[in-house]
Image (cartoon, rainbow, N blue to C red):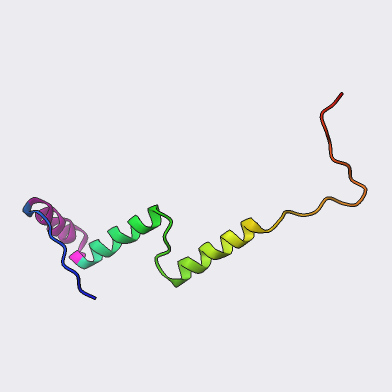
Amino acid sequence: MRKLIEFDDDTFDKLKQLGRDRMATLQELADEAFADLLKKHGIPIDLKDALRKSARLQAAAKPGPAAPKGARKQGPKR
């Protein structure tokens, strides 16, 4: 999918230079930047990332191990 993004001349020149320095295309720089932005806001980037996040949420929702029978809760000391 193609979308247009407009940059001011100074920003575009700096992006082109960064691309040359890193031997990367402007598309690769944009992919990296948007992936970092999505990660920062907790939005999965791809299916693998979404599945990892889902597994973490399910593990966090499971109750912890039950206390052994006969164990008493410890209350404040009197």
Query: How many marks can you see?
Result: 0
Whether 46 is drawn above or below 41: the answer is: below
Q: Nearer the viewer, residue 66 or 15?
A: 66
Residue at 45%, 72% in the rendered image: 47
The outermost residue toward the top is 78
Whether 78 is drawn above or below 42: the answer is: above
Q: Which stretch appears magenta?
A: 10-26
Residue at 18%, 64% in the rendered image: 26
The outermost residue toward the right is 70
The outermost residue toward the left is 9
Residue 28 locus on image (x, y percent) = 24, 66
Residue 40 locus on image (x, y percent) = 38, 52
Asked if residue 13 lies in the magenta stretch, the reply is yes
Residue 59 locus on image (x, y percent) = 63, 60
Residue at 16%, 67% in the rendered image: 4
Q: Quadrant of residue 5?
A: bottom left
| Majority secondary structure of magenta residues | helix
Q: Quadrant of residue 35?
A: bottom left
Quadrant for the N terminus in the image: bottom left
Residue 14 vs residue 1: left or right? left
Quadrant for the C terminus in the image: top right
Asked if residue 61 lies in the magenta stretch, the reply is no
Residue 24 vs residue 61: left or right? left
Residue 30 vs residue 63: left or right? left
Residue 62 vs residue 49: left or right? right
